[in-house]
Amino acid sequence: MSTSPLVFVELVDGEPSPGSLGLLAVASQLAPSVAAVVCGSGAARAAGLLREYGSETTWHCEDPALDPAFGQPFVAAVAWLVLEHSLTTILFENSTLAAHVAGGLAARLDAGVNWDLESVSLSEDGLRGVAFGLDDTVAVECTWRSPLQLAVFRRGACMPVAKPVTGRICAFEPDLGQCARGLRVTERRDDPDLGGGLQSAEVIVAGGRGLRDRTALRLLEDLADALGGTVAVSLPLVDRGWYPAGRQVGQTGKTVKPRLYVACGISGALAHRVGMDASETIVAINTDAAAPILNVAHAAAIGDLHEIVPALTEEIRAHRSR
Amino acid sequence: MKVAVCVKVVPSGGDYRLLETGKRLDRSTPGEMNPADLYAVEEALQIAAGTDGVETAMISMVSEGCTEALRLGLSMGIGRAVAIVDPLLEGSDLVATSKVLARAVQRETPDLILFGGQSAEGRGGMLWAAVAERLGMPAVAGVNSMTLRDGEILASQRTANGATFVAAPLPCIVSVLGSAHEPRYPSFRDVLAAKRKVIELLSVADIGLRPEDCGDEGSRTCVVGLLDRPRRQGGAAIFSGDRAVLSLYEYLVNRGLA
């Protein structure tokens, strides 16, 4: 590869997302030297950390227009780097912001974008990617036909690998364009979390739309307690105000990869599945045997969660006390 | 004021079949509107209901034989549909598709353009961003509720720890991610009324593009082939009936999970 692959690093609460760090490990398999770009508030500080994961050249920009609420200034910033440094490959981990940046760059720079990637490799004809498609039932090998290649990885596909290097850190000041003019944030609201730990939990019991009422969450908490895990929810329950946003798994929430994920009353809309489908074992408890969650589940109990969940909790506890 | 919703037609109920070449999805079945797009349709209807004189339209790049799937959106209440149907479009990737949709949107000159979340079979969720870039229009992503006030869109985005509230001037593009309003079920009367609504058919030439702008030639990615190692073989172990709980418990125990 003639130039260093560039990793788009996303900041979550001022820290590089684990997936972004994982991309640095993927990129280092492609070329001897890896570059990263990190934008927004806290970028300069994060740039230092990226050296611990193998970034030889890290560009950072803290222009206040680079607010993760809006993707377009990020498109402009990364496009500027691509043109200035003749970059040919950019790696992303899927998120709302990454999708915005990759989609915008594809249109702006006439660049091919492959997504839902699990891995990429270099062949004689250049970069190749492997993506799982159609609800993971097929593995597709794909390639690019443009000078600039955009590769968007599935969330949770790339794990960070520590690799300290003495890399360069460079601030850059791109022209961010006019596109996002008029867009503004009017308010930010942070819900207090219930103590965090969602992303490190080994077992997650998650609830969705199928929950009859707020008190049903208690049933999930009991099961989580019996399994030594914690409770998460899908977006509708956050919207209903039943649980804090920090507990949401999915496109606009957390990405999790526990040993066991129990999805209770969750139909499995894509926006939820992208946050959990890398879990080791997925169990669904659902009244609808045709729900999309069954396409990613390894096992499913068909029936009313309000009966199955407490019965399962009881079963686990009964055996344990024996 | 005009609100346009860009929608996709996908194979019904997740029934995906590949064409014999193995590289493309069989889109010859009638299909259904992408479930995630129904939330965008619903938001368009909510905005139309809350403001006088709002016109609504759907725009879709769709295979021949799939256009009737758009009747669902029309029966929910969208005024009319524009379908770009052309054999030249087959095999279009994001670069090509965004070119086509941007042209079709331009032709409608809407004040607000809505997209749904990820499509059920493609799960890219990037098209709206590419279209916004081509039209040079401000875009807001991942919106779960929105209102129109004083010629501005006020929207909320869910974030990992809460919510961000944003304001966007018109015209703008918004990608809707559920779930403030559940998509309505059309009544029988609505379904009948939708049969009389217009689905305008446009070709690639009609929107001023050349054959090389779309299809394989207009695309910047390609599928090399299928690999013989799916991640899943499909099909979960299903437990139902009286023994469901016990079977599930045993399943967990056998895997050292309970």
Image (cartoon, helix red, strand yellow):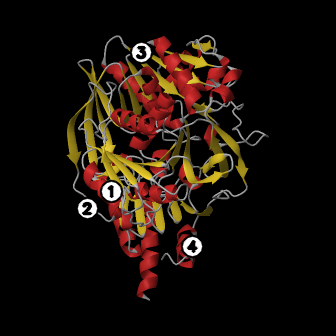
User: Compared with residue A65, is residue A3 higher up or lower down, i.e. above or below?
Assistant: below
Q: Which mark is residue B110?
A: 3
Three-letter code for the amino acid on which mark 3 is drawn: Pro
Whether pointer 1 and pointer 2 mark residues with C-beta atoms closer than 8 Å, the reply is yes
Report the chain holding disc 4: B
Three-letter code for the amino acid on which mark 1 is drawn: Arg
Three-letter code for the amino acid on which mark 2 is drawn: Leu
Whether pointer 1 and pointer 3 mark residues with C-beta atoms closer than 8 Å, the reply is no
Whether pointer 4 and pointer 1 mark residues with C-beta atoms closer than 8 Å, the reply is no
Q: Which residue is mark 1?
A: A247
Instruction: Respond whether the residues carrying marks 4 and 1 are from the same subunit.
Output: no
The span from disc 4 to disc 3 (Cα, nearest Å) is: 54 Å
Q: Which mark is residue B251?
A: 4
Residue toward you, B226 or A66? A66
Instruction: Respond whether the residues carrying marks 1 and 2 are from the same subunit.
Output: yes
What is the x, y in percent for residue A285?
Answer: 50, 60
Closer mark to the observer between disc 2 and disc 3:
3
Instruction: Respond whether the residues carrying marks 4 and 2 are from the same subunit.
Output: no
